[in-house]
Amino acid sequence: MPSTLARFLELKKSSVTSLIDSLENEGFVCRKDDPSDRRKVLISITEKGVEHTKKIINKMFSVAKKCMSDLDDETLEKAIEAQRILLNLQRHMYARSIELLDKKCTSE
């Protein structure tokens, strides 16, 4: 829901609504009515959004590798592994935040 997302991100609801509008216009997310509550709208990432996210992550790895091209192979491999660990941590934190957000939404 845009209002829940706004509270979670500590942004104004209008800012989040504008962001969601832009993402939806680009085909990265879609809005769906909440089947359990007609007043609520759920936001879901689309396949295009998933693919775009993958492209961004790959680009980040590519840029990082170019920026570190003057490092020796051992240091470079350690740096890339550290980035992978951080990315996995970020994914975990995202998944956990969704769980916590869901719990908060159901308790309201």
Image (cartoon, rainbow, N blue to C red):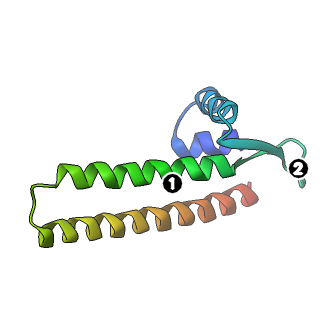
Decide: few, some or many residues near mark 2? Use Cα within 10 Å; few <14, some 14-19, many ≥20.
Answer: few
Q: Amino acid at mark 2?
A: Asp
Spot occupied by residue 35 in the image (x, y as percentages of width and height): 90, 53
Name the image quarter holding residue 84.
bottom left
Name the residue nearer the viewer: 57 or 98. Answer: 57
Residue at the image point whose x is 58% and y is 30% from the top? 12
44 sits left or right of 39 in the view: left
Residue 37: assigned label: 2
Q: CA distance from mark 1 to mark 2?
A: 32 Å
Task: Indicate the quadrant where residue 26 lies.
Answer: top right
Give the label on residue 54, or none: 1
Does residue 107 lie above or below 60 as drawn?
A: below
Q: Is residue 49 left or right of residue 35?
A: left
Q: Considering only order in the chain, which callout, 2 or 1, is on the residue closer to the N terminus? A: 2
In the picture provided, is 67 more to the left or to the right than 10?
A: left
Res. 64 mark: none
